[in-house]
Amino acid sequence: MTRFAVAALLLAWFIVGCTPMPRFTNPPGNVPIAEPREQPEQPTPIKQRHPTLSRIDLDKMNHIIASYMMTPYQRGGSGVLGLDCSGFVYVVYRDYDGTRLPLTVESLYRLEDRVQPDDLSYGDLVFFRTDGRKISHVGIYINNGKFVHASESRGVAIDDLSADTFASEYAGARRVK
């Protein structure tokens, strides 16, 4: 199985496992029929709506993240041959909607929209002080206390914010607009 297939399966399993099952209340034979519409609704661009991504946007972002899963760590890297943490954030948002984010952790941390830990949404950037006082690591929050990042030892991987290492080094979060 290829690296991409394994990563896609892991990401799909994580998302499907967190999605509630739909409930149907209409008995058979009593199904409401929708009126046809003249124009299909167009989704509002992400930059014009609430920062929480829609289901369609989640699918697109998940596909992009899955395509980079297990990519090896490379200091200063921003491509499929190797990524560092800020390079990973850069390529995900570039591939998602063309957003060109800064390529350093410090510059990303200076983004204006700060997010409180209890307000984290899918796609928010989470920052850590892994080198003492300096902001030195970044990842992308993917819900349920998890984030994806470029790990020096494992490449692009999913981790839990509440893990001892990350909880003690957490420095804050920013929202990309």
Image (tube, rainbow, N blue to C red):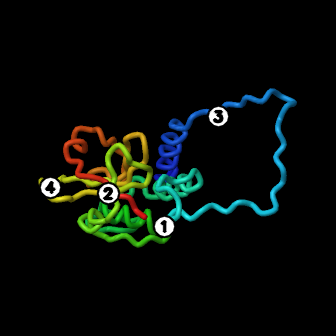
Q: Position of residue 12 (x, y in %)?
A: 53, 44
Indicate which label's residue lies in the foreground, 2 or 3. 2
Q: Earlier in the sequence, mark 2 or mark 1?
A: 1
Three-letter amino acid code at the position of disc 3 = Pro
Three-letter amino acid code at the position of disc 2 = Arg
Which residue is under mark 1? 95
Indicate which label's residue lies in the foreground, 1 or 3. 3
Element type at mark 1: helix
Which residue is under mark 4? 131
Q: Earlier in the sequence, mark 4 or mark 1?
A: 1
Q: Earlier in the sequence, mark 4 or mark 2?
A: 2
Which residue is under mark 3? 22
Most extreme residue toward the top, as rendered?
27
Q: CA distance from mark 4 to mark 3?
A: 45 Å
- Quarter-of-image position of residue 164: top left
Q: Position of residue 101 (x, y in %)?
A: 37, 70
Q: CA distance from mark 2 to mark 1?
A: 23 Å
Which residue is under mark 2? 114
* Side (left or right) of 75 relative to 48: left
Q: CA distance from mark 4 to mark 1?
A: 29 Å
Q: Residue at x 41, y 40 (%)?
A: 144
Q: Is residue 3 visible?
A: yes
Element type at mark 4: loop
Q: CA distance from mark 1 to mark 3?
A: 31 Å
Q: CA distance from mark 2 to mark 3?
A: 34 Å
Indicate which label's residue lies in the foreground, 4 or 3. 3
Three-letter amino acid code at the position of disc 4 = Asp
